[in-house]
Image (cartoon, rainbow, N blue to C red):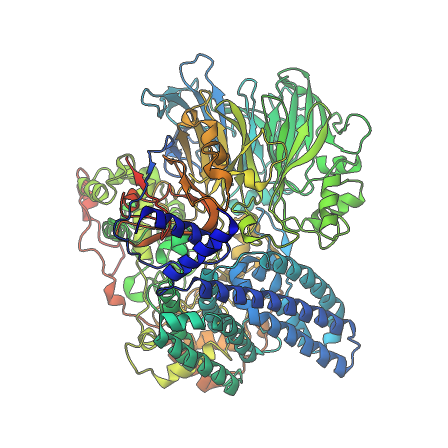
Amino acid sequence: MTKRTYLLFALAFSCLVANAQTLFDNEITIPAGYAPTTVVMPPSPLSMQILFIGGVDMVQSTPTYGNPAGEEVAKEWHDFIGITPDASGQSQGWVTVNHEMIYASNKLGDGGGMTSFKIARKADGTLEVLNQTLNDGRTGKFFNVDFVNTTGETGMNCGGINSIVDGRIWTAEEWFQNRNLDIFNGGNGVRDTSDFTVTNSDIPGMNGRVLKKYQNFNYMTEIDPKQAKAIRKQYNWGRQGFEGGVIAPDNRIVYLGPDDVPGFFGMFVANTPGDFTKGTLFAYKHDKAGWKWVPIWEPGLLLDHNNLATSKGATMFNRIEWVAINPDDNFIYFTETGLDNPVNAWADNAAAGGVFHPATIARAQANGWAGPTDPNYRDYYGRIWKYDPRTAELSVYLEGGPVFADSPTEANYPSKHLSNPDGLNVIKIDGRPFLAIQEDLNGTSRGRVPAGVTNRTCEMFLLDLSIQNPTVNDLIRLTAVPAGAEVTGVVQTPDGKSLLINSQHPSTSNPFPYNHSLTFAIHGLDQIDYARLGNRSQDLDPEMAKNDENAPFSVYPNPVTRVVFMNKTTDVALYDANGKRVLVQRNTNQLDVSSLPTRHLLPEKCRWRNFEAFCAISNS
Amino acid sequence: MNKKTLTISALLACFFLAVGFKENEAALALQKTTKQFHTDLNLTAVAIANMKAAIVRLDGSTASELAVQEAVTNARMAYKKSEFLIAYLDGFAVKKNINGAPLPSVDPAIPDVMVIEPCGLQVLDEMAFSEAPTDEKAAMLSRCDKLIQDFKDVAQHQSRLPLEHRHVMEAIRQQLVRTFTLGVTGFDTPGSVNAIPEAKAAFEGMYAAFRHYMPLLEQKDRGLAIVLDARMEHTLKYLTENDDFDSFDRLAFLMEHIEPQYQLFYEVHKSLSIEFAEEVDKTPRAVNYHAVSLFAPDFLNAGYYANLDRKHPLMEKRRELGLTLFFDPILSKNIDRSCASCHHPEKAFTDGLPKPLAAGGKHSLLRNSPTLVNCVFADQYFWDLRESRLDRQMLHVIKSEEEFDTNYPEIIAKLNQSSEYKQLFAAAYPEQPDYQVSTYSISDALSAYVASLTDFDSPFDQYVQGKTGVLDPAAHRGFNLFMGKAACGTCHFAPAFNGTVPPTYDESESEVLGITLTADTLNPSLDSDLGRYANGMPRSKAEFYKTSFKTVTVRNAELTSPYMHNGAFKTLEEVVDFYNRGGGAGLKLDVPYQTLPFDELKLTKAEQADLVAFMKALTGDMSKFKSPKHLPKVDNQPEWNNRKVGGKDYQG
C-alpha cells in the first residue's frame, strides 16, 4: 500500500467514525510497509516529590495535657497549605498544613491541628525539608502547631488564609457544633469541655471572657508558622463555619468564605493595616444601594453571626469554600461548592430576610423552578464567583456542570465536567495568572463521575484568568493526583518553580505513599510555557488544529509532553508493541498518555488502528 | 477536498474495512439501544405521572386503593425495564432518590447529620401495599411529587449522555447481579412482594436492548449468538412459569440462569472487541469484571477494599511479614497480647467468648470478637463502622488501653531492636528506605495478611462453582429461604453474605435489630450499646443509628459462636429464632428505628433447621490458615525472646 492510499484511507475512516461508535479489535495486525511518522514523547518537565506523609511522618510536640514534649505520628487528612516566604532569601520559607479531622491525642492536642515545616530549594531543583530548632527548644523537621497551650484547641482545620502581603497564616475551623457533648464526641473529639477563659487576647473586650468550650471553636485562627504555635482566634470576625479567605493587598481588608447553608460572603476591614484585632465586619448584600456591604459587627463577641446576617438581609450562598485573589488586578474569586438540595437549610433564612443573588434566582427559573426555595430546587455542581473590588459587583465566573437544555451532538459533548469546586488559588505560569480549581464531590450522580463509576474521583483544573467568559471546556485538567483522593491546598512556592498540593483521604489501591494523606510538590512549573498548556493547543500548530473535516487526520504536538491532540473528534485506541489494546477513548480529540508505562510506547509497533501514522515513544 | 470526493473515499474505506469488520452494524446497534432507552425513560416518567393521578384519587374506597396499587406496580415495572441502564449510569441517584431502601439516611456531602427522608419507588411500594393506603395519601403525594422531579433530573441527564457499547455490556452484567441479590430476594418490593414479575420485566428490558447487538454477534461468533438466544428465551419462560415469591427456587435460578448468563455476556463483551473499563480509566472497582461467576473467589476484589495492589511482586513477602506480626505479642505494651489473642484461626479468627478479655484479664472488652475471614470485603470496619480503612483498623487496637495499650513510635522502637525483623521489613519494603520499619509498613503488612484471609471454597461454593454436583437438600432449601421467605439475603448480601451492598459492593450497611442482653426471649431486655451512633464520626449522630451494628458475614458462622456484637446467642438456632420472632421489636421491646421487619417470619421448625443447614454449608476449611513457626529474635532483649507465638494465653 502506498503512502498516498493510506492517507485517503485514514481520512475516510476518521470521517466515518466521527459520528459513529467504533468497535476496536482486541489485537491488530500491522500492514507491511507501514511507515509511521512518530510523535516523540520527551520526559515531562514536571516531576513530583513527596514532602510530608500524614499518619506516617513524625512531628515534634510541645508539653501537652501534662505530657512532656516529644515525638508523635502526624495527624492526617491534609487540607489547606500555607507558605510563609523567608524574607532572608535563604530558604523558600515555612509550609503549614491543615489536618481536617477531629481526633483525640494526648501529645498533639485534641481536635484538628496543623503541621509546620521549612523547605529550601536544592541545587538539583528538588525541595528539602530543613532541620530546625524552634525557640521552645523543639528540634526536628516537622512540628505540631501548638493550639492547646495558646488559643485553645481547633476542630477540623479545613481551609485558611495565606496573606499575599506578608505570608501570615490563618487556619479555618469548619466543624460547627453547638453543644459540648458534640465536640466531646464520645471521647474521640475534644475531651476537656470545661469552660474556656480567654487570655492574652489583644482583641478588645475578650481577655478574661469565659466561653462554653464549644463556643471557642469555629473562628479563623492566626498561627505563627515559624514557631509552630497559634497566636489568636479572630473572635471579631464572627463565629462561623469558616473555610477560606484572603487578605487584600492593602493589608486592611479580609474577604471571608464560610462553608454553610446559607453561607454569607464576608469582609472585615481593619482600622489599621496589618492589625486585624480592631475593625468592622460586613456581609455582602447585592441589592443594597451604594456600597453593597452591610455592617454586622456589634461590639462584643459575635456568636450568632448567621442570624444577624440574615436579619440584615445579606445575600445567601450554598456553601462558600475557598476564596482567592488575583494579585494582578485584585479581583476576588470564590467557590460555591453547592449542596444537592439546600432548600430546607435556607428556607427559614429566606423567610427571615436573607436574599438571593439574581444569578441564583435566574438559574432556578431557567430550570423551571419558582426560585431557590422551590422544593424542587437542586444545585448539583456548584460554581465559581468573581468579585470586582472597585464596583463591589459579584457575578458567576464559571458555572459548574454543564447542564444541557438540549442534547448536544456527540462532537460537542464536553470531555470535562466541573463538579463541586472547593479548593481555589491563583498561581502563575509564564507570568500569567491561572485559577487552580480543586473538586470535592458531593455525590457521584448526574455526571460528576464517568458513567458506571461509583467512587468519587476528584479532579484538579487550571483556568486561564485572561479568559473573560470561560466555560468548562476552557479548563485544563491536571491529573497528577492519586485517584479517589480529594486534592486540595494548591499553592505555589515563592520562587514560582513548584506547586505544593495536598492529597486527602485517598481510598484507592495506590502504592505507598499515595494511599495516605500527603503533601507533595510538582516541580518544573517554570519550564512550562503558556502556549503549550492543554487547551491552548491551537497555539501549538494552528494549521493542524482547525478541526477541519476535510483535513487529513493528524496528531500533534511533536514532541508531546502529556496530552496528544488530534485534529478530529473521534474514537481512538492505542495498541502496545504486541498489538494488544491498552487504551480506548471515545468521542475525543485528545488523549492523556502520561499515565501509560513507557513500555507501551515503543516506536514502530504501536499505532492507532488504521489511522495515519501515530506513535508515541519515550526517550526517557 | 470537496464533499463529493470525500464520499467516494469513504466508500472505498468501507470496502477495505468490510473484511471481518462491521462498523455500521455496531453503530446501528448502539443507536437503536439508545433510542429504546430514551423511549423507556419517557414511559417510566409517564407511569410515575399516572401513579400520582391515582394517588390523588385515593378516597378510602377499595377500588381507589387497588388502583393505586396497580399504578405503583405499573410504574415499578416500567422502571425495571430500563433499570439496568439507569442504575448503572447513576447508582448514586437511584439509591438516594429513585429506588433506595425505605429507610432514612444521612447526606454524605457534609461532615454532619443532615437527614434524607426515605423516598422513591420502594417507599411508595411499601405505602401502597400497607393496610390502609388512603391513610398514607398525603405522604404518598409528597413522595410522588419528589420522585417526579428526581426522575426528571435523572432522565434529563441520562438522555443526553452519549451511551457507549461498554456501558450496555457492563450494565447488563451488573443487572444480573442486581436482580439476583436485590430483585428476587424481595429487597426492593417490601410492600407488593412483586419481585419475580419485576425480575422478568428487568430481563425483558435488557434483552430487548441487547437484541440490537444480535446481528453483529452472529457475524462475530454465531455459536455464542445461538446459545445466548436460547438462554434468553429459557429465562423468560422460567420466570413466567415460576412467579410465586415463596416457592421460587433461587438456587436453581442462580445455577441455570444467572451464572451461565453472567459468563455468556462476558464472552459477548470480549467477542465484540468492546473495550473493558480498565482500558478507559484507572478507577479501581470492587467487582472484578473478569470473574465469570458470582461465587468465584476473585469476584470481589480484596485489593480494592484493603487499598492494596495484590499483584504487587512483593505482596507474598508482605503477607508473610503480616502473618508474623499478627501472631507476635511484641506489638503490645507488655509483650503479652497479639492479634491472635482474640482471633484464633481454627475458629475462623474469633475467640469463642461472648466478649474477649481486656488486658490484665480482669474484665471484658466492649464487643464480641468478629471473624476476620472475608472481613476485608467492607468499606468500614468494626461493629460500629468507625474505621474506613483496613490499614488503620489496627491503630484502634494498638492505642486502646484495654488492648495493646501502646503506640506506633514504641512499636517501631521495639522492632528496630531486632535485626531479624529489620531484614524482613527491608525485604518486603525495599523501595521505601526511609519507611522500612514505620507506621506505614507495619499497618500495610498486617493489612496484606488480613486481606488474604478469604474463603469461597465451602461446600456451597463448590456446588455453585460446579466443582461438586452434590449439595445437602436441607442446605438447598435453606438457601432458598435465606434469599426469599426468611429475608436474610436482603441484608446479608450474596456472595459474601455480609452487609456490603450489591451490585457495586462499595458500601457497608449496619442494621438495628433490637439485640437483647441474652438469648432469653421470655424475659427479654435490650442491650444498651449505642453502636454506630457513638462511633465518633460526625455523620453517625443520627437517631436512627442508635444501636445499629455492622451486618457481618454469615460465612463460617458454624465456627464463630457466640453471635451478635455482645455474644448473647450461643447457637445458630437461637439466632434464627430471634429473627423469626421479629427481633427486639417483635419481642415487644421499644426499638423505634428497628430495620429488621418486626412481624414474625412464620418459619416452621423444619424451615429454621434448613436455614441452619445452609449456613453450615458455608463453612470453609480453616486449616489452610497457618500460624508462624517462630517469632523473630530481638538482639539485646533476651527475655523478649521467650515470648510465645500468639502471646501469653494463646492456645494455637
- Front residue of B170/B426: it is B170
Residue B393, horizontal then vertical, whole percent: 40, 50
Along the viewing direction, whichever of A440 and B582 lies nearer the viewer:
A440
Locate residue B50: give its quadrant: bottom right
Q: Nearer the viewer, residue A5 or B311?
A: A5
Identify the residue at image location x=76%, y=38%. Answer: A310
Q: Is residue B337 visible?
A: yes
Quarter of the image where one finds residue B76: bottom right
In which quadrant of the rendered view does residue B268 lie? bottom left
Image vertical order of residue B639 relative to residue B553, above or below: above
The residue sitting at the right extreme is A289
Number of numbered discs overlaid on the protein picture:
0
- Identify the residue at horizontal 73%, vertical 31% (top origin): A284
Q: Is residue A464 above or below residue B652?
A: above
From the viewer's perspective, is A575 left or right of A189? left
User: Does any portion of residue B381 appear in the rendered image?
Assistant: no
State the image coordinates of residue B343 (x, y, percent, origin top left).
32, 59
Q: Is residue A107 above or below residue B509?
A: above
- Counting from the top left corner in percent of width and height, residue B62 is at 75, 83
Q: For the point 39% across and 52% down, which residue is it?
A: A9
